Image (tube, rainbow, N blue to C red):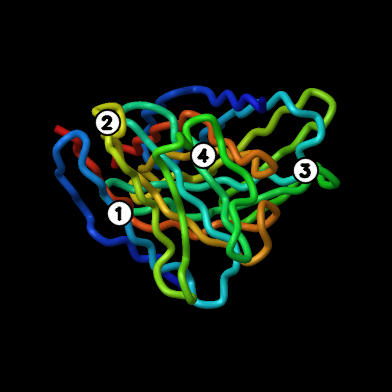
Amino acid sequence: GEQVEQLPSSLIVQEGASVLINCSYTDSASVYFPWYKQEPGKRLQFIIDIRSNMERKQNQRLTLLFDKKTKHLSLHITATQPGDSAIYFCSVNNAPRFGAGTKLTVKP
Amino acid sequence: GPKVLQIPSHQIIDMGQMVTLNCDPVSNHLYFYWYKQILGQQMEFLVNFYNGKVMEKSKLFKDQFSVERPDGSYFTLKIQPTALEDSAVYFCASSNWGYYAEQFFGPGTRLTVL
């Protein structure tokens, strides 16, 4: 079945830094890739998505890049703030399957 | 924004007992999901439910598991009988376009089987 790998497992950065979270999947038939974040003690919250007919999507400080050939996604977060501290999950919704998550900690 | 509710937030039961986890999805959504997350591990898909039927289920959705949504009320996950390995947080989600739209998640029910 579909496998979703997400790296790194954790990131610690200073406020204002940019971060990159990588995700790879195995099923070339997958077409929809939503991302979620989960702040401590809160529910998963949708943040951005991309479909397989796109290469790039931006939502404010979030940019999601998609490479269909390599079956790879990258979530770029710029100008990080302490409020961005959360666990970020990539997802392949054809399955649906989640990555293991990336715990982002932004220090003030 | 729209919220998915889950009741209860925490349930402790003895192994072998039955448990029902309740989910109140977003009101106009038609697709419903259950996920299982053991502490420190990945969130795993259990089942997808649409139009009164299970559309897809994973290997984790054992014969002891069942789901239903009688008359548009709660979407429920029933485990009968429970086993120790069922201890986890169970997340409910709903969406209005199946797998190809964002899902709205509940806060989870922490199930502890003793």
| Left or right relative to B65: residue B100 | right
Q: Nearer the viewer, residue B76 or A5?
A: B76
Which image quarter: residue B42?
Answer: top left
Q: Which residue is mark 2?
A: B83
Residue A94 image position (x, y, % from top left): 70, 42
- Which residue is depicted at the point 22% across and 36% down? B16
Q: Nearer the viewer, residue A43 or A103?
A: A43
Mark 1 and mark 2 in contact? Answer it, CB < 8 Å.
no
Whole-angstrom CA distance, mark 1 to mark 3, is 34 Å
- Which residue is depicted at the point 15% across and 44% down? B12
Q: Which residue is mark 3?
A: A31
Q: Which comes before the other along the chain, label 4 or label 2?
A: 4
Which image quarter: residue A30?
Answer: top right
Q: Which residue is mark 4?
A: B45
Q: Nearer the viewer, residue A10 or B30?
A: B30
Mark closer to the observer (1, 3)? 1
Looking at the rendered structure, whether the residues under marks 3 and 2 are on a common chain is answered as: no
Q: Residues within 10 Å of mark 1 (few under 14, many from 20)?
A: some
Mark closer to the observer (4, 2)? 2
Q: Amino acid at mark 4?
A: Phe
Q: Is residue B7 above or below residue B41?
A: below
Q: Residues within 10 Å of mark 4 (few under 14, many from 20)?
A: many
Mark 1 and mark 3 in contact? Answer it, CB < 8 Å.
no
**Regarding mark 1 in the picture, which secondary structure is present there?**
strand
Whole-angstrom CA distance, mark 4 to mark 1, is 18 Å
Which image quarter: residue A28?
Answer: top right
Whole-angstrom CA distance, mark 1 to mark 2, is 14 Å
| Left or right relative to A16: residue B11 | left
Q: Amino acid at mark 1?
A: Thr
Mark closer to the observer (3, 2)? 2
**Regarding mark 3 in the picture, which secondary structure is present there?**
loop
> What label sits on residue B20 in the rendered view?
1
